[in-house]
């Protein structure tokens, strides 16, 4: 059975940052699973792209996944209100599984309190949140610190996904 | 210099069918060029994703490209009103360069009159247009007939892009 890559989804996700990884990991032979606060629910991107979540935060655990992708947009502001999703991020980190966040996605890493002393990038607007959470901010297209992979914006999607694939295909 | 992959753009393109190839071919080391009736112009997808065209139909020719991608949505209905874009498709075919169309994208192949006797798929709504243009319709995720590669819908994007890459990386 194909390994599962989870992708977090909530209203106002950055459309390309969800769509690109969603199809990219399928193309690479993985099963992509859209995880939202609710399962079987339509969420629209900040530009309007509609997707339907596969499972709820109650119906998935770190054991099920090889990697968790956190797209940006305003969705992470909503996603981190769901304690089970924040716990999922903590659990993935404890199991040293790939956590990949782009744009405003690293807000999830701040809320999970797992970036103290670790190298992280993000959209510039949340640089202070990264640093206040103890992260070491680096303004680069992609930053890999062990299992944590971060990027800044949609234009970084090609290097972001390449870095994730490198890690989960090893 | 990186080889160029052209992607046609007009209002109401299917967002994922433009976004996925756009980043996918960059990830594979190609230069992606958004070609619209006008250059430097913002076009929005049918769900609202905004992109800016790189060049106009007057400023590109088949010699510049290794492949031309035609996303779906309602954009192809508009794209084929531009005679230079239809001519670009004809020229690419005459040079046996990769022409890849998905969903409603194959309308461009119908207007270019290059599919007589060739195997093609598309979104089901335009099956009759394919057949009236002399194409042999096949309901499969991806159909490859020499330099013409076609798919049906966003869910086919992983196999669609894989088939294009196989051809242009050879």
Image (cartoon, coloured by chain):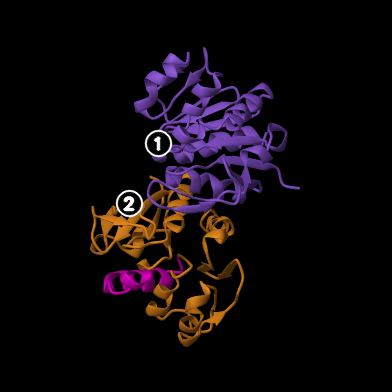
Chain colours: A purple, B orange
**Residue B18: where, in percent of width, then height?**
42, 56
Q: CA distance from mark 2 to mark 1?
A: 15 Å
Disc 2 target residue: B50
Q: Which residue matches tag 1?
A: A153
Quarter the C terminus of chain B occupies: bottom right
Q: Position of residue B9 (x, y in %)?
A: 34, 60
Seen at 59% across and 22% down, the residue is: A146
Q: Main secondary structure of the magenta part?
A: helix
Q: Nearer the viewer, residue B19 or A79?
A: A79
Determine whether, in the image, residue A12 is placed left or right of residue A112: left
Residue found 49% across the figure and 45% down from its top: A18
Element type at mark 1 = loop
Q: The N terminus of chain B lies in which quarter of the figure?
A: top left
Q: Look at the image and tell me whether residue A22 can be seen.
A: yes
Give the chain letter at badge 1: A
Is B88 covered by the magenta stretch? yes
Magenta residues (range): B76-97
Nearest the eye: A131 or A81: A81
Of B158 and B45, nearer the camera is B45
The magenta stretch spans residue B94: yes
């Amino acid at each position: 059975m194909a390994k599962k890559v989870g992708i977090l989804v909530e209203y106002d996700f950055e459309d390309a940052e969800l769509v690109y990884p969603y199809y990219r990991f399928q193309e690479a032979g993985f099963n992509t699973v859209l995880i939202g606060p609710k399962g079987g629910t339509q969420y629209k991107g900040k530009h309007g792209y509609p997707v339907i979540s596969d499972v709820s935060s109650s119906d998935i655990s770190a054991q099920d996944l090889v990697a968790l992708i956190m797209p940006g947009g305003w969705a992470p502001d909503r996603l981190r209100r769901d304690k089970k999703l924040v716990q999922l991020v903590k659990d993935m980190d404890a199991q040293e599984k790939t956590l990949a966040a782009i744009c405003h996605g690293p807000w999830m890493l701040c809320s999970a309190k797992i970036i103290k002393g670790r190298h992280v990038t993000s959209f510039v607007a949340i640089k202070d949140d990264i640093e206040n959470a103890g992260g070491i901010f680096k303004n680069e297209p992609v930053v890999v610190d062990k299992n944590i992979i971060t990027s800044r914006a949609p234009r970084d999607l090609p290097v972001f996904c390449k870095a994730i694939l490198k890690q989960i295909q090893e």
